[in-house]
Amino acid sequence: MKNEKDKAYSNFVLKLMLICTILILGSAIVFSFSSFYNDHILKEEPIEIDDPNVKRLYDYVTYGRDLEPMYYFFRNKELTYDTFDEVEKMRYAFQLITNDDIFDKDEVSFKILGDSYKRAIEKIFGINTKYNINSQFTIYINNFFKNAIVNVSYNQEGNYFLVARINNISNNNNIPKLFYTKLDSYHIDSMTKDITIKEKVIFTETLYSNNLSQIDTVMVYRDLNHIELLKEIKNPTRDQIKSLSIKPYLNVANTITYTFKQDEEGNYYFYNSVMAY
């Protein structure tokens, strides 16, 4: 009689263990599916940046995209704060110049305090970063002069930068952009405090006909070198051009990862970027 009770008890324990195992496996499957869903579907929705540091750093690397093909980050598979082109540093630092930094402004030019420009460069690329102060460059801007191409040159005697307007430009929304991007994710390391931002990107090439007056074909590529073709759009309509986006290509788009570190004063600066081709 005792053996039968022991046997019944053992069977009950085995059944209980089997039920628990099934529940655990089921939870694991649901969790895995949920993770897959979040990683591969929900990311199609816009990501809101709720951290002011992350938003400011993302603005650093995306500056100028609306006005010009300023895609230095995309042209290089890997960049660091010390391999970053010194002229490009000057261009990206322009975004931090404010009205308090300029003087002698008129309709065609103004001057920027040399020390202000130095602070702007070091704020983005780190203290004592290397740059060529005598660099002369052009850049498209939308502040100080609306939608203008300007030339920037350094005056050593006066320790200021002269910004001279060359001409105005007009944006044409009826042609494809050279690239389409989307913020993919960001992460703040709890130990190192490093901030990483991931962004998806695809590239396009536009072929024209009728003496460049009409768009014949839009080619969508995964890479900047236009080797991995994703789609070919023949005779695109204006609506097709306006609706072009990275959304249909998120699973095959390139990913660029930006990393920012803190200096000894706790300020974040650009450390490196890596493009996953």
Image (cartoon, grey):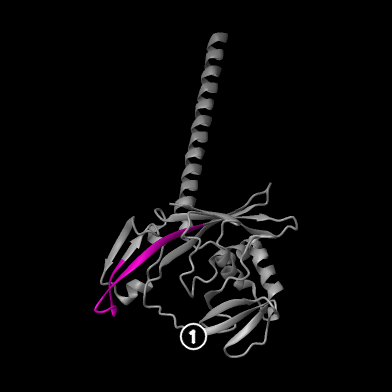
Q: Would residue 80 appear left or right of 71 to someone viewing this image? A: right
Left or right of 209, for residue 192: right
Q: Is residue 159 something that shows in the picture?
A: yes
What residue do we see at 68% from left, 48% from top? 192
Question: Mark 1 belongs to which amino acid?
Answer: Asn
Q: Which residue is mark 1?
A: 167
Image quadrant holding the N terminus, namely top right
The foreground one among 46 and 102 is: 102
What secondary structure is found at the residue carrying circle 1? strand
Q: Which residues are magenta?
A: 199-218
**Residue with the most extreme front position:** 157
Residue at (64% x, 72% y) in the render: 96
Establish if 96 lies above or below 21: below
Q: Position of residue 253 (x, y in %)?
A: 41, 56
Is 73 colored magenta in this rendering? no
**Would residue 216 be counted in the magenta stretch?**
yes
Residue sitting nearer the eye, 265 or 20: 265
